Amino acid sequence: MIENITEEYTILSEKFLEFKNNNDVPARINTNDDSVPDVFKNYKFPVSGWPTLINKQMTDELTVLSVKIPKLLKQIPSLYFNDDINKLADFYFGGDETLTEFAMICHKKDIEIGCRLDLTFTEDGFKVLEANIGSSIGGWQIQSFESLIRNNHPELINKDKVCNYKGRNTLQIYMKFLIEQINKQVGENSIINIFMEMSGIEDEFEKQQSLIFFDDLFKQELANYGVKGGAYTGDINSLVLVDGNLCLGDKIIQGLIILTMDMNVTPAIFRAFMMDKIYLPDHLGLKMLGDKRNLSILLELAQAEKFSPEENVLILKNIPWTSFIENKKVFFKDKEYSLPYLLKTYKDKFVIKVAIGSQGKDVFIGKFSSGKEWEEAIEIALKNNAFIAQEFSDSLDFLAPNGQNEWTSHKLIWGAFGFGDCYGGVWVRMSEERTDVGVINSATGAVEAIVFEIAN
């Protein structure tokens, strides 16, 4: 029931009283509804029947962070490592200088790449927990349930053609971004084809449904540019250079996106990219940009005032204390500590996570770990030299409906998208506070929720 809610923070923001009569709304939507695209029927994660509403201030903050942070990350190789191949190789590529040389060649092409920031909203505002960069970032799927969720709430239906609750179609924004980047990289063409590397999807039916869904949306956006083309997939090794163009059979490919964590850039693809024949966001340099240790580096650069005054303030305000884990001295809250001692002594204040990872894997939260588990995590991190320690940024409690449609306290993680200079919207994963184990991720049981922006 929603009538008795008076607390300051709810997922309905300051508008929760407008929804007080919606007691028949299902706690979780049925994704088999006719309005849901076939590819998302039987969606494997639970989706809230209730939206999350945010006001203009939150929208503005997310917009700035989603656009600015990726641009700052791109400056790290030059500002922090001085483009030194030896240092970059040791830090990001296990000492492989040849691979680093190729990665830096790709990086220096300075192309725009999509990013999703994972954030928590604390007493001090939004905190950036990590930056996920590349084509394989998820979260945009939630927009496919928009009409179903709106239909459950009369307040969300446009009245007199005035949209009081705006939803951002992340995938449509991405399609526009993708086409514009291809035009920028390759030049404008009357036909634009993209290849989707989908070897990570083992189920052939799921793969085909995904391709059909993506191809349809891509063609819709191409039509807005007066251009034809489509999306294709297959064996990435079947892409070959023909007269300087990257081809799949008789189709010339102008863009290639890799939807798996493992990049497989063949010599033909690399040559096409170097000749500006394809837009390739998932190039070899992506491993540098996606490393979670970069947040620690951004903090260090901001403390040294290496960015503009406004950018330095943004970093120091919105990125929690972060350090890559080594046997070293660090400053925390203006006091110097041995890092291992700091982590062992104040375990409830910190999180340990692997530098390259996803879906909440290899994440250890001190507050939710036993002493033995925490000691083992520190030991693993010190041995592997590929982990970070981060100050635990606890989410404020937001009232939201649980599985029984009871409004209870939840912890939220926000996933905000940035595509070049364009903010692509945000979605939410939430976990009921009484069952919270620290890691709030769809793959570990969190509930997904769509986000609408309050227009007035």
Image (spheres, rainbow, N blue to C red):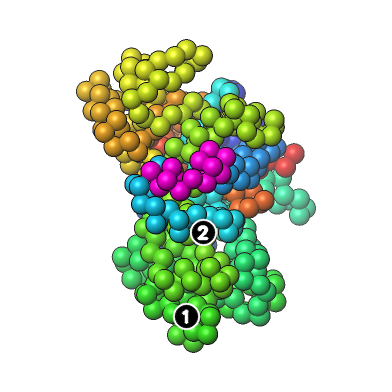
Residue 362 in sight here = yes
Q: Quadrant of residue 451?
A: top right
Q: Quadrant of residue 435?
A: top left
Mark 1 surroundings: few (<14), some (14-19) or many (≥20) residues within 10 A? some
Kindly state the secondary structure of the residue where label 1 is placed: strand
Q: Which residue is mark 2?
A: 106
Kindly give the residue lying farthest to the top in the view shown. 335
Measuring from the top left, give residue 186's x and y in whole percent.
62, 71
Measuring from the top left, give residue 192's x and y in whole percent.
59, 76
Above or below: residue 62 compared with residue 389: below
Q: Which residue is mark 1?
A: 241
- Toward the viewer: 69 or 111? 111
- Residue range in magenta is 77-90
Q: Is 89 part of what is drawn in magenta? A: yes
Amino acid marked by disc 2: Cys
Q: Is residue 444 left or right of residue 178?
A: left
- Toward the viewer: 228 or 73? 73
Amino acid marked by disc 1: Leu
Above or below: residue 100 compared with residue 27: below
The quarter of the rendered structure image containing the C terminus is top right
Measuring from the top left, give residue 26's x and y in whole percent.
47, 45
